[in-house]
């Protein structure tokens, strides 16, 4: 690769951990992503049923706020957050991790977005 080419550009933007919380970001994000994998490719009705069973909730009459809460609970299930905090973004499109020197947003699938907004009818 030529000197000063793409490799030089990539190395100049590499983020390094600034504190101990930063060191745990990758395992926290990967664990959350693994939990979301169980749901992301299902239809909205299947997501509703999976969350009802997993969290022991009744999805009938659920509001978008209920569904956000349930999806967040399922995403964080058995995940040690190591001082990170997690929330679904206001547009329902991402799960935001905050707490270290950076913020990371994990994109939610189109099906999960539709489920959050419309429920099992989505």
Image (cartoon, helix red, strand yellow):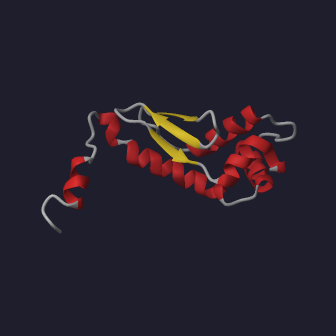
Q: Quadrant of residue 62?
A: top right
- Estimate the x, y position of residue 45 in percent, counting from the top left: 80, 53
Q: Is residue 3 above or below residue 121?
A: below
- Estimate the x, y position of residue 71 in percent, counting from the top left: 66, 42
Of residues 36 and 58, the one nearer the viewer is 36
- Estimate the x, y position of residue 58 in percent, counting from the top left: 82, 40
Whether residue 41 can be seen here: yes
Q: Residue at x 63, y 44 (%)?
A: 74
Q: Residue at x 66, y 53 (%)?
A: 110
Question: Would you say 68 lies left or right of 122 here?
Answer: left
Q: Residue at x 70, y 54 (%)?
A: 111
Q: Is residue 97 above or below residue 46?
A: above
Quadrant of the frame with the N terminus: bottom left
Whether residue 56 can be seen here: no
- Estimate the x, y position of residue 65 in percent, counting from the top left: 73, 32
The extreme bottom residue here reads 1
Question: Would you say 116 lies left or right of 88 here?
Answer: right
Q: Quadrant of residue 64?
A: top right
The extreme left residue here reads 3
Q: Residue at x 37, y 35 (%)?
A: 102
């Amino acid at each position: 690769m030529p000197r000063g080419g793409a490799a030089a550009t990539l190395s100049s933007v590499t983020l390094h951990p600034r504190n101990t919380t930063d060191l745990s970001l990758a395992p926290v994000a990967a664990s959350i992503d693994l939990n979301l994998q169980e749901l992301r490719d299902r239809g909205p009705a299947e997501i509703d049923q999976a969350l009802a069973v997993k969290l022991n909730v009744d999805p009938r009459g659920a509001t978008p706020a209920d569904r956000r809460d349930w999806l967040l609970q399922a995403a964080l299930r058995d995940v040690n957050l190591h001082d990170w905090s997690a929330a679904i973004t206001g547009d329902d499109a991402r799960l935001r991790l905050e707490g270290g020197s950076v913020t990371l947003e994990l994109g939610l699938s189109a099906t999960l977005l539709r489920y959050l907004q419309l429920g099992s009818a989505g």
